[in-house]
Image (cartoon, rainbow, N blue to C red):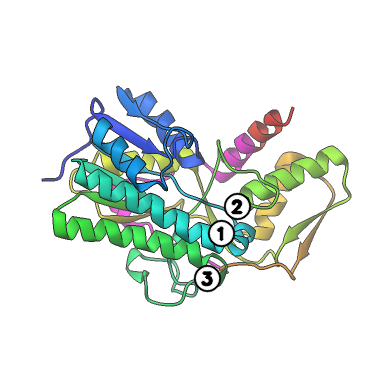
């Protein structure tokens, strides 16, 4: 029998220090959750099967948010495909199995929009999964995430385990990764334009042609969507979560340049990969529930830029 989430139950957030996990933690704390379980990587290695099994046997979390993963942008996915597939398969397999085995009442698995075929129709519906080839630059990560979604479905079918899979669009906001090479596009551009402004650089080079279209969602909006699903009896087992609005990478670069106060030239490097040209998500499943993103892109980016700037001083 499906049920809504009990905020007084034991709730485990795997990956609570990451961008999504920390947003979920903030949201649950604000909602008054009383028994939040968190473990740092030093305290619990999620790749270690026996360590994860021992944790679930001892702590018996009743609700699980599986937000732990090895993540990165195009460069990281291209450079470390073995790590992306091995670590993500291990993390999600260990947690999903242990959650079911030790009586978890409901689990939410964080997927990714990159699981969908590179050239599928737009906007992308949940049913388009496995209907065509993946984007080669993040295939290892995507295959791991597809396996996680299918594992959730298999445990639901065979054991009646209530596991939900959510597919977010490009996320940004507090807790983002601003690594100079391994970050996603919004964070990478925020860092690049901020540093160019401070250095007085005459131009900034942006990877790719600038033509790909991207949809962006503030991570706090995404956390709100996840909580909406976990609190909803009979929630859909797979749901896309997006903002419903997209813009080109070139438009994003110009917007971030404006918001950081950078006035130099923007140069695009077409020798660098563009990735998927378009991947707007169809959000009709969440629309039916009545959930919609609430943070305008301009306001959300300005908040992220100010937070990044403050962290550099």
Q: Quadrant of residue 67?
A: top left
C-beta proximity under 8 Å, tags 3 and 1: no
Quarter containing the N terminus: top left
Compute the Cα span from label 3 to label 1. Answer: 15 Å
The residue pinned by badge 1 equals 214
Q: Quadrant of residue 307?
A: top right
Q: Position of residue 269 (x, y in %)?
A: 76, 65
Tell us which disc is closer to us: 3 or 1: 3
Q: Check the image and report above or below for 220 versus 7.
A: below
User: Does the stretch in magenta take in 292?
Assistant: yes
> In the visual, does 29 lie left or right of 261?
left
Looking at the figure, which quarter contains the C terminus?
A: top right
The numbered dot on residue 135 is: 3
Query: How many C-alpha atoms fall within 10 Å of the one at disc 1: few (<14), some, or many (≥20)?
Result: many
Identify the magenta region. 278-304
Question: Is disc 3 placed on a helix, strand or loop?
Answer: loop
Residue 53 vs residue 150, the one in the foreground: 53
Q: Gap in Å between the C-alphas at discs 2 and 1?
A: 12 Å
Which residue occupies 37% across, 36% down?
A: 13
Q: Residue at x 18, y 50 (%)?
A: 161
Tag 2 residue: 184
The CA span between labels 3 and 2 is: 16 Å
Q: Is residue 110 visible?
A: no
Looking at marks 3 and 2 on the same chain, the residue that comes earlier in the sequence is marked by 3
Circles 3 and 2: CB distance less than 8 Å?
Answer: no
Judge from the rendering whether residue 32 lies leftward or rightward of residue 196; answer left or right. left
Residue placed most toward the observer, 298 or 304: 304
In the structure shown, which secondary structural element does the residue marked by tag 2 occupy?
Answer: loop
- Asked whether the viewer can see residue 122, the reply is yes
Q: Residue 123 in magenta?
A: no
What percent of the width, then of the height, locates residue 281? 43, 60
């Amino acid at each position: 029998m499906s049920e809504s989430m009990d905020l007084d139950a034991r709730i485990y957030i795997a990956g609570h220090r990451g961008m999504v996990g920390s947003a979920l933690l903030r949201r649950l704390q604000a909602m008054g959750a009383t028994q939040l379980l968190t473990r740092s990587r030093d305290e619990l290695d999620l790749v270690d099967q026996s360590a994860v099994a021992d944790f679930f046997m001892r702590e018996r979390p009743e609700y699980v948010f599986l937000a732990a993963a090895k993540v990165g942008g195009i460069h990281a996915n291209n450079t470390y495909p073995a790590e992306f597939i091995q670590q993500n398969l291990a993390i999600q397999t260990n947690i999903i199995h242990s959650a079911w085995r030790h009586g978890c009442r409901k689990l939410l698995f964080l997927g990714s929009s990159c699981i969908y075929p590179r050239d599928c129709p737009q906007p992308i519906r949940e049913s388009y999964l496995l209907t065509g080839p993946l984007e080669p630059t993040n295939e290892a990560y995507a295959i791991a995430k597809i396996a996680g979604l299918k594992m959730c479905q298999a445990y639901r079918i065979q054991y009646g385990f209530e596991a939900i899979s959510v597919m977010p669009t490009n996320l940004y906001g507090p807790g983002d990764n601003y690594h100079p090479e391994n970050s996603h596009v919004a964070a990478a551009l925020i860092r690049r334009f901020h540093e160019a402004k401070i250095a007085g650089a005459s131009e900034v080079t942006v990877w790719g042609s600038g033509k790909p279209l991207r949809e962006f969602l503030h991570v706090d909006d995404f956390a709100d969507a996840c909580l909406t699903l976990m609190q909803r009896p009979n929630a859909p087992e797979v749901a896309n979560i997006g903002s419903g609005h997209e813009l080109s990478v070139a438009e994003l670069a110009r917007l971030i340049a404006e918001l950081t106060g950078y006035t130099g030239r923007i140069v695009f490097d077409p020798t660098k990969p563009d990735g998927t040209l378009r991947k707007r998500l169809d959000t009709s499943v969440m629309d039916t529930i009545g959930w919609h993103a609430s943070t305008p892109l301009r306001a959300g980016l300005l908040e992220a830029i100010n937070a990044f700037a403050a962290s550099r001083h």
